[in-house]
Amino acid sequence: MFCRIASKKVPAKIIYEDERVLAFEDINPQAPVHALVIPKKHISTTLDIEDEDHALIGHLFQTGGKIAKEKGIAERGFRLVVNTNPEAGQTVYHVHIHILGGRHMHWPPG
Ligand code: 5GP
C-alpha cells in the first residue's frame, strides 16, 4: 500500500518528499498532528532493516524531527512511533514512522 503511495498510484496529502523518503498525513489521525514518514525503498518491518539501510533509517528519523518542527510541535513534545508486527498494532507492512503530537501523550501507551 505505501509503495503505491510512494509511486503516486494512490493519492495522499504529501508534506515532504526527497529521493529517499516520503511524508504524508495519516488518513485516520490519532492526534491533532499525525503524519507518516516512509522510506521509498520497500522494507516490511523493523526486523527487515539491513546494514545497507542504516543511513536511510537515520534520515527517516531526522525527517520525522524536521516535520515536527515544521508542524510547530517540536518544543512542546511529540512522538516518533514505529509499530512492529501484530501485537504492536502494525497494519501496513512497509516501515513507517508515525509523527504524533499536538496533545498530551500518555505513558504507558495503550
Ligand atoms: P500501523 O498500524 O501499521 O503502525 O500504521 C498504519 C497507519 O497507516 C495507520 O495510522 C493508518 O491510519 C494509516 N493508513 C493506512 N492506509 C492509509 C492510506 O491509504 N493513506 C494514508 N494516508 N494513511 C493510511
Image (cartoon, rainbow, N blue to C red):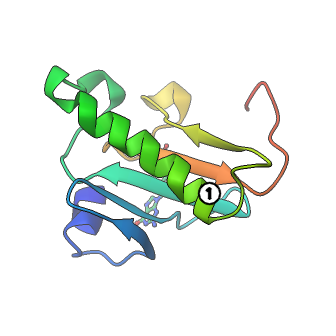
Q: Quadrant of residue 46?
A: top left
Comparing 20 with 29, the one in front is: 20
Q: Quadrant of residue 110?
A: top right
Check the image and report above or below for 108 versus 36: above
Give the left or right position of residue 90, taking residue 46 as reference.
Answer: right
Comparing 21 with 94, the one in front is: 21
Comparing 109 with 69, the one in front is: 69
Q: Secondary structure at mark 1?
A: helix
The picture places residue 80, in percent across and down from the top left corner, at 57, 40
The picture places residue 91, in percent across and down from the top left corner, at 44, 44
Q: Which residue is mark 1?
A: 69
Check the image and report above or below for 67 versus 83: below
Q: Is residue 58 visible?
A: yes
Point out the image quarter for the N terminus: bottom left
The picture places residue 42, in percent across and down from the top left corner, at 19, 45
Give the left or right position of residue 72, taking residue 39 as reference.
Answer: right
Q: Is residue 95 visible?
A: no
Amino acid at circle 1: Lys
Give the left or right position of residue 2, taking residue 16 as reference.
Answer: left
Q: In the rendered picture of this protein, how many numbered marks are placed on residues?
A: 1
> At 44% from the left edge and 43% from the top edge, which residue is drawn?
62
